[in-house]
Amino acid sequence: MTTAKEEIVFQQLSNAVGSDYISNDPAILVCYSRDQSPKSPKNPTYVVLPGSREEVQEVVKIANEQKIPIIPRSTGVNVAGLCIPTVDGILVDLKRMDQIIEIDKKNMSAIIEPGVLMAQLQVEAYKRGLKIVVPSAPGSVSVISNYVAVRGTSIASVKFGTGDNHIIGLEWVLPDGSLLDLGSCSYQDGWQNGCCGHSPGPDILGLFLEASGGLGICTKAKVKLYPKPEVRRSSIIVYNEHEKVLDAMVRIQKSGIASSGYVHFPATYTAHFFTLNNETAKNIINLLPPYSILAFFEGTKRQIEYEEKVLNKIIEETNGSILNLSEIVSMFGGAEAGLDPKPVEQGIVHHADFMTITVRIMRPKGAFGITVFVHNIEDSFKLYEKFEEICKRLGYEDLTTYYIQPIDDYHFAFIEMDIIYDPGQKDELELAEKVLSEINKVFIVEEFGLNYYESMCGGPGKLIGPKLGKYYDLLKKFKNLLDPNEIMNPGVYLPK
Ligand SMILES: Cc1cc2nc3c(=O)[nH]c(=O)nc-3n(C[C@H](O)[C@H](O)[C@H](O)COP(=O)(O)OP(=O)(O)OC[C@H]3O[C@@H](n4cnc5c(N)ncnc54)[C@H](O)[C@@H]3O)c2cc1C
């Protein structure tokens, strides 16, 4: 049953975006009730699909006048419940705004709308001998929301840093419907000539990163492109002891070689990367050495040759070995047994641009839940032990994995703890949510690293907020200054 106010708002929104691009039909709304996280679903009251910045501004103005919450959504592929409505409100689906407005080959940049997908922009960059840095997430995620909303991490994060490093400037619709340009695009001619990501003087762009739709809607971005490298290679190096694998990773770090490296354990992901079905993966997980480094190189031919020589020396000194995929494939019955070396031998390299294998990690049960902490590489194993202890205590021992990904020239490591679950089974869904929130609670209270991925949203924010002291007070004041009616994604940016 719709109320009189809901009917008025429906009409106003319909006038703003056109009657084809609004719905309050429960059959449509239910598609917007979930994302890729195990968090409980909830339908929005309306969904609107604006086709331009002006329409976004109109929708935001209506919401502000009527004091109705707004939840922005670019592609809805986040794994943290960031666009599941916490209260009734308007879900703004930005997928129609999917234009690559400009690619500047000479200055290696692109101006894009929020509905532009990673794979879409990558194809256009490739045509010009350039590339974008993609996260290790499906190619169907929005470039803007990955860079802005979660500072995406990628297979090349050691060399290129997190997603925010690729932002030159942003166009932002504030919660009152007015416009703000940020970064290099905040000054005159910035959209044409901006190049560095900063405005002159103190830079406030950082305040809008990871705002999870809490400070308005990004309607345009200028992002960096990079030269497409001459050569790319990858190797999987395996170990039986965790001290050795971490020692090798630190040595790789200090030598300055490799564009990236992940340390994976146990062998769950490694097994799923090169198998075609769950049965085969399950059979070989325990046969593979438990610890592996997935090292990824890109650059010129000579550079890669040199880096491989250094890597081989490190492998020798740390008693590691390169996983010979052809050998493994024949050892375990070849292609007939469901083994597929191609995704690793060629796919990892391809993965760096088009994320061809990421979704394989969802294959065993259909979904995975994650939490992420930032720490140094050397001490990262103690986080794993705690993670294992919590999973066992809560009765989750089925499919868990853990990986360490050095970032930003190895200045820190992104430590991801994943549990794989079946989203169609209510008990598994509830257990996944319970395990992840317990990990966040224990890790934040006992200070095991810095919570990164969900830093301010939902549950973790309640625990992190008080630890931030004045900084948190300032964030709340900033939010209140921009959004006094608290219409933007309430309960997600900063919990009450
Ligand atoms: C299998 C899998 C693997 C993944 N691996 C990785 C990985 O390795 N690295 C990585 O970085 N990510 C990874 N992810 C996560 C995912 O890529 C990011 O969470 C995602 O890019 C953000 O989701 P989205 O782009 O669909 O944004 P959405 O889900 O649409 O939105 C995310 C948040 O941003 C807000 N928002 C969205 N658009 C706007 C806008 N235009 N203006 C203002 N606020 C906005 C929303 O309100 C919400 O709070 C993975 C996901 C999956 C499913």
Image (cartoon, helix red, strand yellow):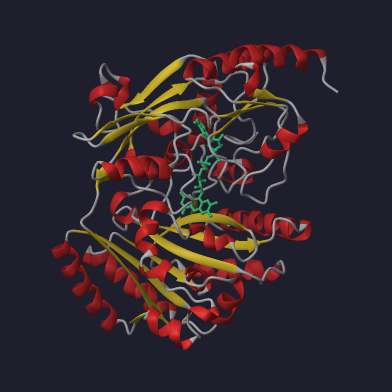
Q: Is residue 272 above or below residue 54?
A: below
Q: How far across and down, in percent of the image, does residue 329 sit? A: 45, 81
Which of the pair 178/337 is nearer the observer?
A: 337
Q: Residue furthest bottom?
A: 331
| Residue drawn at (22%, 72%) of the image | 308
| Residue drawn at (54%, 81%) of the image | 337
- The answer to whether residue 240 is visible is no
| Residue drawn at (53%, 70%) of the image | 276
Quarter in which the N terminus is drawn: top right
Q: Is residue 322 above or below residue 298?
A: below
Q: Residue furthest front?
A: 336
Left or right placement of residue 56 versus residue 85 in this view: left
Quarter in which the C terminus is drawn: top right
Left or right placement of residue 16 versus residue 412 in this view: right
Res 214 → quadrant: top right
Q: How far across and down, in percent of the image, does residue 491 sit? A: 64, 34
Q: How far across and down, in percent of the image, does residue 374 sit? A: 45, 55
